[in-house]
Amino acid sequence: MNKEINIENIKKKAEAYYRNGDFFCSEAIVKTIKDEFDLAVSDDVIAMASGFPVGMGGSGCTCGAVVGGIMALGLFFGRTEAKDEKVSKTMDLAKELHDTFKSRHKHLCCRILTKDMELGSPTHMEQCISFTGEVAEEAAKIIIREFVIALKY
């Protein structure tokens, strides 16, 4: 990661992927973070995010944008070796993203967040586009902050 990161561009790009129908929330966030941070990982990570939109495959559970944001954090801070203790930090950062979203919107349940909205309606789309941009932005802020902290030591 040797390039300047524009957080506003991350937000706008993630929103555009959703708005244009290219990707749903979780996919848009993972793709945007992967591309904007120039990560040398396979696009398979985007495919891994495909089951989470509309509250985990349409079940209405946890907001797919939040899940996509947590997946993006895992790309940077997650473990790949058994018993690697860095999982604790990843979990702390995931909780931070979760708690930030929950403090703003009171819920993480897609079913509650979209209550009384018709799936695919303009109101539903605008809200989910907004959530997608918001979570991409927050995940990027956490990633950048953690790298700045690491550089200080």
Image (tube, grey):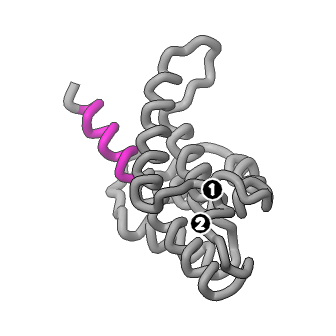
Please provide percent x and percent y for residue 134: 45, 64
Q: Quadrant of residue 26?
A: bottom right
In this rendered view, identify the residue nearer to me: 41 or 85.
85
| Left or right: 23 in relation to 126 | right
> Which residue is found at the position 72% from the left and 63% from the top?
54
In this rendered view, identify the residue nearer to me: 118 or 12.
118
Q: Main secondary structure of the magenta part?
A: helix
Q: Quadrant of residue 127?
A: bottom right
Residue lying furthest left: 152
> Which residue is found at the position 62% from the left and 74% from the top?
18
Q: The residue under label 1 is which amino acid type?
A: Cys
The magenta span reads: 140-151
Relative vertical location of residue 150 with respect to residue 44 in this rendering, above or below? above
Q: Quadrant of the C terminus?
A: top left
Q: Which residue has dot 1 on it?
A: 109
Q: The residue under label 2 is which amino acid type?
A: Leu
> Which residue is found at the position 41% from the left and 45% from the top?
1
Please provide percent x and percent y for residue 124: 63, 79
Helix, strand or loop status at disc 1:
loop
Q: Which residue has dot 2 on it?
A: 113
| Left or right: 57 in relation to 122 | right
Q: Residues within 10 Å of mark 2 (few under 14, many from 20)?
A: many
Please provide percent x and percent y for residue 84: 55, 15
In this rendered view, identify the residue nearer to me: 96 or 8.
96
